[in-house]
Amino acid sequence: MKALEERILAEGKILPGPVLKVSSFLNHQMDPDLMMVLGAEIAQRFQAEHVTKILTIESSGIAIAIAAGAHMHVPVLFAKKHRTSNVSGVLYQTLVHSYTHGTDYTVVVEREFLKDSDRVLIVDDFLANGAAVEGLCDLIRQASATTVGAAIAIEKGFQEGGKKLRDAGMRVESLAIVDQMDENGIRFRQA
Ligand code: 5GP
């Protein structure tokens, strides 16, 4: 998506990792107009899938998930980061490895919000190695619900997540795919 790519080029900063910092419009300060444009694009791409629920992970995925949910008129559920893994039977839980922090954390959703009849679209801000999306898939699996795919704002195409998920048969739609980011700048995969 041109609007997102232009914004990344204008304001993105490359940190060691490599991590793409987009704190001026997505990860800290947020641009609501851009979020709504991204949400509309996600809704359009998945309109034939009869999505009943969007699932994201706190906190950076929530804004774009809300924008997509507003366009699709479906509820948005976010997996909450949980301090301990000792939780009761009212929750589904899974362990996720954080790419940006290098640690593992537990995420949970309340069972009452994820039903076996749900057709769930996963939404997140970034896709790197795929751990966050895989964790969300695991929660959906525990609920015996259906994953219709994943919609991602920015995929880092030079990391393995996108290939791994697509090879496993998942539909992954990324609004911008960064194939290279280094001292020579940022390059996007052409559609
Ligand atoms: P994965 O689980 O696919 O390895 O990483 C995705 C998660 O890590 C996203 O939810 C996002 O919060 C974070 N992340 C991974 N790479 C980046 C990056 O380059 N920039 C930012 N801001 N977050 C990232």
Image: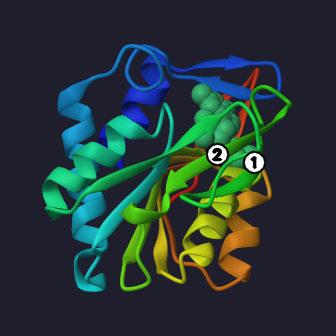
Work out whether mark 1 precedes mark 2 in sequence or the reverse, and give the earlier one: 1
Q: Is residue 2 left or right of residue 98?
A: left
Image height of 5 relative to 24, above or below: below
In the picture, residue 75 is in which quadrant?
Answer: bottom left
Is disc 2's CB within 8 Å of ligand 1?
Answer: no
**Amino acid type of disc 1?**
Val
Image height of 50 relative to 178, above or below: below
Residue 175 visible to an observer of this rendering: no
> Which one is in front, 188 or 19?
19
> Which one is in front, 33 or 100?
100
What colour-coding does the image apply? Answer: rainbow
Image height of 28 relative to 92, above or below: above
Q: Residue at x 85, y 32 (%)?
A: 103
In the picture, residue 144 is in which quadrant?
Answer: bottom right
Q: Horizontal and vertical percent for residue 167?
A: 73, 81
Is disc 1's CB within 8 Å of ligand 1?
Answer: yes
In the picture, residue 180 is in which quadrant?
Answer: top right
Q: Horizontal and vertical percent for residue 107?
A: 64, 45
Of the numbered discs in the image, which one, if any, rests on residue 107?
Answer: 2
* Marks 1 and 2 in Cβ contact (< 8 Å): yes
Q: Horizontal and vertical percent for residue 47?
A: 22, 76
Would you name the residue on which mark 1 appears?
96
Q: Residue at x 69, y 63 (%)?
A: 134
Q: Horizontal and vertical percent for residue 168?
A: 72, 82
Of the numbered discs in the image, which one, if any, rests on residue 105?
Answer: none
Q: Is residue 133 left or right of residue 48?
A: right
Q: Is residue 99 left or right of residue 135?
A: right
**Amino acid type of disc 2?**
Val
Under circle 2, the secondary element is strand
Q: Residue at x 77, y 50 (%)?
A: 95
> Which one is in front, 145 or 14?
145
